Amino acid sequence: MNLSSWNFFQNLRPETKQFAVIGLGRFGRAVCTTLHNLGYEVLAIDREEKRVNQALTDKISSHALELDSTEINAIKQAGILDFDTVIVAIGNYLAESITTTLNLKEVGVKFVVAKASSETHMKLLKKVGADHVVFPEREMGCELARLLSKPKILDQFDIDPDHSIVEIMVPDQFDGKTITELELRNKYGLNLLAVSDQGENFTINPRSSTILKKGTSMIVLGSNQEINRLPN
């Protein structure tokens, strides 16, 4: 079960069927590819003709357009206002990223997601109206640190800075015990959402009589502090 992919896509409104992605670097291409594979209509945009042509060749989007997003008239003429959600994936060019975000909000785009490359960049994007800001490098660094410090965490989805949903290997101390015996809510303040079998299948909301087994995994919801208290 892959939880980490939710970390970005949770903030894209599920009722949205059309997305525009501005900036076709590694991050922008990854967003285009994922949304396109999920069946959404995606418009890929970049100011470099080579990147636009590559997007069309690789079929990572429904459409691709060469456009200078720092020119507000170009944005208006391209019809980007018709897209409910626009992702600004220009992370390494501060002025271009901020100007693009500002232009999108000024023409009336309802929901703008912007990529930041630093804390200062993040603050500026929020000031010019970005509805949601992502900081992929920082988020990946935090996730890696957690995985290294708590090796049995298989996957993690952050609800907020203090709470997460995690998939974790069943600790040795839990082997052979029922959910009732473990008293996860009373002892750790955690809610058990699902348990796996020996393969990749999960039982959602397992019965209290379910016996946990070493070598399988479980998905729990709670505070990071309590999750870190779980035995290895």
Image (cartoon, rainbow, N blue to C red):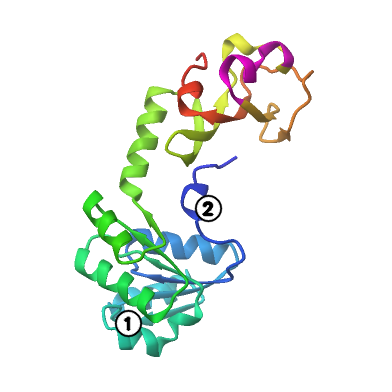
Residue pointed to by mark 1: 67
Q: Position of residue 225 (x, y in %)?
A: 45, 23
Numbered tag placed on residue 75 in the rendering: none
Looking at the image, is mark 2 or mark 1 earlier in the sequence? 2
Q: Is residue 139 left or right of residue 70?
A: right
How many other residues sit within 10 Å of disc 2, few (<14), some (14-19) or many (≥20)? few
Residue pointed to by mark 2: 10
Residue 200 visible somewhere in the drawing: yes
x 38%, y 23%: residue? 149
Q: Nearer the viewer, residue 213 or 177?
A: 177
Q: Amino acid at mark 1?
A: Leu
171 relative to 80, above or below: above
155 relative to 119, above or below: above
Disc 2 versus disc 1: nearer the observer: 2
x 42%, y 38%: residue? 161
Farthest residue, direction front: 127
Q: Which residues are magenta?
A: 180-190
Q: Amino acid at mark 2?
A: Gln
Secondary structure, mark 1, is loop
Secondary structure, mark 2, is loop
x 36%, y 43%: residue? 139
Q: Is residue 144 left or right of residue 200?
A: left
Residue 5 visible somewhere in the drawing: no
Separation of marks 2 and 1 at Cα, in angstroms: 28 Å
Q: Is residue 169 left or right of residue 52?
A: right
Q: Position of residue 172 (x, y in %)?
A: 58, 11
How many other residues sit within 10 Å of disc 1, few (<14), some (14-19) or many (≥20)? some
Q: Give the image quarter of residue 173.
A: top right
23 relative to 170, above or below: below
Q: Position of residue 120 (x, y in %)?
A: 22, 53
- Residue 91 is a magenta residue: no
Q: Give the image quarter of residue 49.
A: bottom left
